């Protein structure tokens, strides 16, 4: 993916979690692969600022607090857990085609992007005690 002006190579991604489910999004034109919201951090932003901005742009949710789950330095991804936010989902149609809330124990049944899969297995499952 080509970087836009002002973008770093680092992505900040968020697992939105409520009532035993996580939010998966299907990027526009992604051949039925599901991802998690987030994107490239700008040079002027912290990872937290980047994930707040990207999620507001992509899905219309304003994060109240994001908890750092971990950093995948090999792939330049930073993962956050979000359990509190405001607003209703409004998709940025140029980037996100659809979304769904998926039970935590069923998430790996979906065809996930490498980013979503690695974040789920390496960070989110550990956060929830391997459930």
Image (cartoon, rainbow, N blue to C red):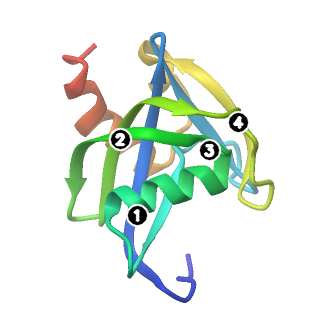
User: Residue at position x 75%, y 46% from top?
Assistant: 91
Q: Where is residue 12 drawn, in percent x and y?
A: 39, 57
Could you tell me which secondary element the residue under label 4 belongs to? Answer: loop
Q: Pointer 2 and pointer 1: residues touching (CB < 8 Å)?
A: no
As drawn, the label of residue 66 is 2
Q: Residues within 10 Å of mark 1 (few under 14, many from 20)?
A: many
Counting residues from the start of the chain, the first of labels 2 and 3 encountered is 3
Task: Say which label, 3 or 4, has the lower sequence index.
Answer: 3
Taking 9 as reference, is 37 above or below it? Answer: above
The quadrant of the image that shows the C terminus is top left
Report the side of 87 relative to 50 (left or right).
right
Mark 4–mark 2 Cα distance, whole angstroms, equals 17 Å
x%, y% of residue 123? 25, 37
Q: Between 104 and 53, which is closer to the camera in this rendering?
A: 53
The residue tagged 3 is: 33
The residue where tag 1 is placed is 11
Residue lying at 58% horizontally and 33% vertically, measured from the top left: 86
Residue located beneath label 4 in the image: 89
| In the image: residue 43, left or right of residue 102 | left
Element class at badge 1: strand
Secondary element under disc 2, as helix, strand or loop, is: strand
Is 2 or 19 nearer to us in this picture?
A: 19
Say which of marks 3 and 4 sits in front: 4
């Amino acid at each position: 993916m080509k970087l836009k002006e002002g973008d770093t190579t680092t992505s900040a991604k968020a697992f939105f979690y409520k009532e035993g489910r996580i939010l998966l999004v299907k990027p526009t034109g992604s051949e039925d692969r599901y991802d998690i919201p987030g994107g490239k951090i700008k040079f002027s932003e912290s990872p937290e600022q980047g994930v707040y901005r990207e999620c507001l742009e992509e899905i219309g949710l304003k994060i109240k607090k994001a908890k750092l789950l971990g950093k995948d330095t090999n792939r330049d991804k930073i993962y956050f857990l979000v359990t509190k936010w405001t607003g209703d989902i409004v998709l940025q149609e140029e980037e996100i085609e659809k979304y769904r809330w998926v039970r935590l124990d069923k998430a790996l049944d979906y065809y996930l992007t490498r980013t979503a899969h690695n974040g789920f297995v390496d960070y989110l499952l550990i956060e929830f005690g391997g459930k």
